[in-house]
Image (spheres, rainbow, N blue to C red):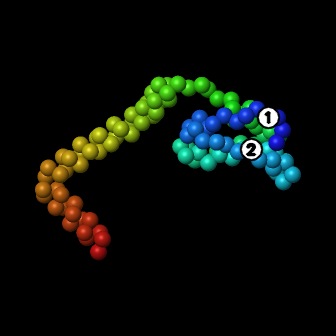
Amino acid sequence: MTDAPKLKPCPFCGGDAEVTDTTKVLGVWRLIHRCKAIGPISLERYNEETLTNAWNTRADLSADLVRAALEAAAAPIYKWSIAAAEEIEALSADPETIAAIVARVTEAGQ
């Protein structure tokens, strides 16, 4: 490796990334990181320094900003799950409906 800047940890899981010289085979430097939060990440650039700079360039996000973004993204799912739970609760209050559902499921399984 050359004197490229040091790689920052993953912004999602905090893990380490690894730069590999694949110029002889692929003609590029490759960075691979098996992120525990979002899955595999792969970047390719024509030299180690631009690859490292690409990995290290990111918005500096505070924990509060990240939390707010995640809550905003999860809000529609949460609302749907509350509505589904309310429907299930309403169904479970009616023994005849439950018996009919059980009968249909049993029939379908035979």
Q: Residue at x 74, y 44 (%)?
A: 19
Q: Position of residue 102 (x, y in %)?
A: 21, 63
Q: In the displayed structure, does residue 85 sit left or right of residue 14?
A: left
Considering depth in this image, is 41 or 73 the residue closer to the camera?
A: 41
| Farthest bottom residue in view | 110
Q: Position of residue 88 (x, y in %)?
A: 23, 49
- Secondary structure of the residue carrying tag 2 is strand
Give whichever of 77, 56 is nearer the camera.
Answer: 56
Task: Confirm or deny contact between disc 1 and disc 2 (CB under 8 A).
Answer: yes
Residue in the image at 42% along x and 32% along y: 71
Residue position marked by numbered label 2 in the rendering = 19
Disc 1 marks which amino acid?
Ala
* Crowd band around label 2 with a 10 angstrom C-alpha radius: few (<14), some (14–19), many (20+): some
Q: At 56% from the left edge and 26% from the top edge, which residue is drawn?
A: 61
- Structural distance between the alpha carbons of marks 1 and 2: 10 Å
**Quadrant of image for the N terminus:** top right
Residue type marked 2: Val
From this viewpoint, is residue 23 visible?
yes
- Which residue does the image show at 63% across and 36% down from the upper left? 9
Question: Which corner quadrant holds the C terminus?
Answer: bottom left
Which residue matches tag 1?
Answer: 4
Q: Is residue 9 left or right of residue 79?
A: right
